[in-house]
Structures are given as structure tokens and as C-alpha cells.
Image (cartoon, rainbow, N blue to C red):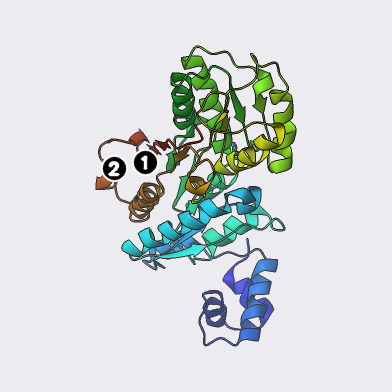
Amino acid sequence: MATIFDIAKKAGVSITTVSRALNGYSDVNENTRQMIVQIAEDLKYYPNAAARSLQGKKTNTIAFAPLLNDHLEAEPFFKEFTGVLALASFKHDLSLLVTLVGQNRNLQEIYRELAGTGRVDGVILADIKPQDERIPLLQSLKMPFVAFGRSIDYDRLTYPFVDVDGKAGVAKVVAYLHSTGHHRIAYLAESFTLAYARDRYEGYRQGLKEAGLVEDTRLLALNLQNEESVATALKPMLDLPEAERPTAIVAGNDYLALHLLEVLPKFGFTAGREPGQIAVTGFDDLPFASFLQPALTTLRQPITSTCTVLLDLLVAIIKNQDKPASLLNSGPGLTLFGPKQVLLQPELIVRASA
């Protein structure tokens, strides 16, 4: 493994110059700094963040690391989420570094660099995948982190996380639709590359089971991304005989619900709660949801509570403290899944679309 001595030797400069260049000091010539950084990258050198921490050298900066290129339709949610997270960080006297993973870089390199350069004291991961390589990587690097979301191996989770219970939320939506007279309930899902999408689909299946309804694969569409894919998936459902046609459609996110509202009239149907209309629901309660026609019934993610708990947990981990006082007991809308693992409940917002 390369050391700071190797970099200094190859660059022809002192160890002090290398250290100051890699830590961003302004008294290092920019050309020299760029040369040193390039050599460090070539040698795959990363300073030991754990050692810096033991020396008391905190940066009072945390990183927020979503994978937005995996689901561009969620950008409005993460813009709002990032703003709330920044405010929560400010209340902890922390700076927030937002780092987006590009498609042209290796994930291992990105997170090794993030953990190793000493720029941040901890990381909030987002867009957790069903099997997420970043989690064991950060564990091996001993980098403090909290995940916003869970991988799918629920029985073997050993890392701190905060998650919104999508499964329970969608099950609640199905129960609500059933209680208002719907027995033919369809589901439109986004890509299962992210764990929460699978979670929401499982909530649909659970909701059907609890309502005594049988899942009909003709009323299920997966891996939808845009209006065209929604239209393609919807046509065979609406071509079914009236007795078999869906009277309600649950969308896995608000963008799919938006596309659904745009497509339904093209097939001669409208969304709403009146007889003959098709009920439509979403998930997230994005800012546009209440302005649609009809206004969208959806599940609201508790963004403020989520950001607050994420920061409380991460600060406790960085400071090697026990669970923060705010999480000593479960409360309404909050469940302790494990010692530093929290589930928050989404809120059903009923509007004119269902």
C-alpha cells in the first residue's frame, strides 16, 4: 500500500508539502497541488480517516451521497430532502457536502476516497440497493455512516439506518382503497434496482392479502420509467372486460401517478373517486401532487423527521455515544428496528384522485 513518503519521493517535494496539498491548504502552488493529487490517485493512496479521528482532527463536515443517476425522476424529492438535511446539519453545527456518484467512476474508488481523504467525519448514504456494495465497504473502512434506506436482507442488517416504511405505507393505501369499495386494484412499479421499490411492491402484495384479494398478474406492471412505458402497460389492463378491469391503480411513486393521470384520458377514462372513474394513488407527496387535476392521493414521506433522526444517529456514531435521547423510546410514527435502526411511517394524504 502506498504511503505519503512514496508520493513525496515521486513528486520530488517534502512530506509536509504533500500533506498540505492533500488537505487543501491554500499556501501550496496550484500546479504542485494538482501534480500531488494526480500522483496520489495513480498510487491509489488515501489518508487514514480513522487515524485522523483518533488524533481529534474532526472536520465538522458530513457527506450526503445519493445515486441520483439511478432514478432521475426522483430529483425533486432529493432537492427538497437535501435542503432539509442541510438545515438539520446546521443545527448540529455541521457542514454538509453533497456528492453525486457519476456513471463513469468506480463505486469502490469513490467511497474509498471519500472515507480516506479526511474531508468528512461521516457519510449519509442514500438510494440503497437490494445488495449494496457501499455498506460493507464503509464498514471495512471504519467510516461512520448511516443509510437512508435498507438492503433487502432484513434479518441480517448490522448497520445503522433510517428508513421510511414503504411496505406498511402501500399496504395502508390498498386497505384504504378496499375500504372504499375497490376490489380490482392494479400496481405500477418503477425499477427494482433500488431497495425501496421492492419494499413498496411487497406492501401492495401484503395489502391485497390482508384485504382477502388475490393478486392478478394482469394488473401488475414493473420497471416503468416514463409516460410511454405507463401507456404501454396500461392499455392491456384497460382492454380487459369491465368486470376484470382495475377500478383503482396504485403507483409506486408520484411521477408514475402523474404519467397515469396524463395517460388515462387517452384511453377514455378519468381519475377520481366517482362511480365509473379509476382511483389513482402515488407515493412521496412531491410538491406538484396537490396541484394536479385531480389532486393526487399519496403517501407523504416525513422528510423533516427523517433528516433529524439521520443526523442524530450519525452524530452519536461519530462521537461514539449511545443512542441519542430522541430515540430512546418508540413513538407515534417511529419504530426502533434495532439499536441504531429506525423505521418511520409515511402519512396517507387523501385527495380527489382516490
User: In the depicted view, which residue is nearer to us: 216 or 319?
Assistant: 216
Q: Which mark is residue 327?
A: 2
Instruction: Identify the amino acid type marked 1.
Output: Lys
Mark carried by residue 340: 1
Above-or-below relation of 49 to 178: below
Q: Nearer the viewer, residue 95 or 31?
A: 95
Q: Secondary structure at mark 2?
A: helix
Question: In screen coordinates, is 73 left or right of 341?
Answer: right
Image location (x, y in percent) of residue 109:
64, 57
User: Residue 83, which numbered label?
Assistant: none
1 vs 2, front mark:
2
Could you say whether the residue bearing mark 1 is in a helix, strand or loop? loop
Tell me if residue 92 can be seen: no
Tell me whether the residue at label 1 lies in contact with that at label 2, contact meaning CB atoms closer than 8 angstroms.
yes
Q: Position of residue 29 (x, y in %)?
A: 60, 88
Q: Residue at x 48, y 34 (%)?
A: 166
For marks 1 and 2, the one nearer the N-term is: 2
Tell me how many marks there are.
Answer: 2
